[in-house]
Amino acid sequence: MHTTTNNTPSRSGAVAAATVIVPVAVFGFGYGLARNAELTAWIALVALIAAAGAGITQALIRVVQR
């Protein structure tokens, strides 16, 4: 028998944490390796877009499942 649990709060917390942590980590990593501000900015932008996309995807999945 399969039981489901509602992990929505922890998932939203994880997405929120990733939205903050990932760009900071990518910025630090990119700056340390490349020392090129433009490259670092692009990497951080891609990370932010990916984190936002994950949150939007989760929201759309919730709407469709209702």
Image (cartoon, helix red, strand yellow):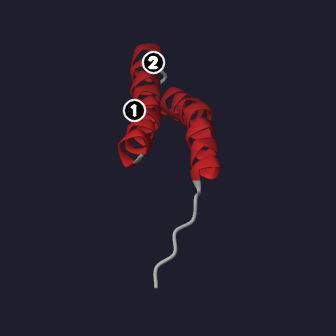
Residue 30 in percent (x, y) is at 48, 30
In the rendered image, the vertical position of residue 57 relative to residue 34, given as above or below: below
Q: Residue at x 41, y 14 (%)?
A: 38
**Viewer-nearest residue: 52 or 31:** 52
Find residue 41 and name its label: 2
Mark 2 vs mark 1, CA separation in Å: 18 Å
Q: Residue at x 57, y 49 (%)?
A: 11
**Label 1: which residue?**
53
Q: Residue 22: name its quadrant.
A: top right
Q: Residues within 10 Å of mark 1 (few under 14, many from 20)?
A: few
Amino acid at circle 1: Gly
Viewer-side label of 2, 1: 1
**Viewer-nearest residue: 17 or 47:** 17
- Earlier in the chain: of badge 2 and badge 1, it is 2
| Residue 66 relative to residue 23: left or right | left
Q: Secondary structure at mark 1?
A: helix
Residue 41 in percent (x, y) is at 45, 18
